[in-house]
Amino acid sequence: MEPSKLLASSLRQNILRELSINSEVRMINFVVKLKSTYTDVNRNLAILERENIIRSEYPQKVRHGKIRIIQLNKDNPKTKILLEALKILDSYK
């Protein structure tokens, strides 16, 4: 997917901003911090994960489900392009 299409969603932009500040974020923290729904966040994370922009891991099980940790894949050149594009977009605010 083209970088412009990846940045077409403000939720994806905010996910990338948050991950650029914090090296890893729990899935539930995205939902709360971005004032979104689990479904919307999960759908946008799936897009980023398909493009290998982010990685998910499940380091431990909890009583009702699993804790999902999200990290940027800084080895992917597309990730660097997206973060630079976000910086440029943010400079116009």
Image: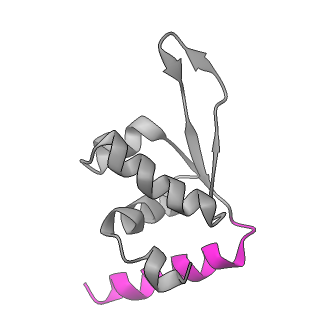
Residue extending farthest to the top is: 63
User: Most prominent secondary structure in the magenta stretch?
Assistant: helix
> How many numbered marks are there?
0
Query: From which residue to which does the magenta span run?
Result: 74-93
- Residue at position x 66%, y 63% in the image: 52
Q: Quadrant of the C terminus?
A: bottom left
Answer above or below: position of 12 versus 90.
above
Which one is nearer the viewer's eye here, 50 or 36?
50
> How far from the left and from the top, in percent, is residue 54?
61, 58
- In this rendering, position of residue 4 left or right of residue 59: left
Answer above or below: position of 58 versus 65.
below
> How far from the left and from the top, in percent, is residue 69?
57, 39
- Residue at position x 43%, y 57% in the image: 44
Answer above or below: position of 36 versus 48.
above
> How far from the left and from the top, in percent, is residue 79?
62, 73
- In this rendering, position of residue 32 left or right of residue 21: left
Q: Quadrant of the N terminus?
A: bottom right
Answer above or below: position of 76 versus 5.
above
- Residue at position x 52%, y 61% in the image: 47
Residue extending farthest to the right is: 75
> How far from the left and from the top, in percent, is residue 42?
43, 47
Check residue 79 for magenta coloring. Answer: yes
Check residue 86 for magenta coloring. Answer: yes
- Residue at position x 54%, y 62% in the image: 48
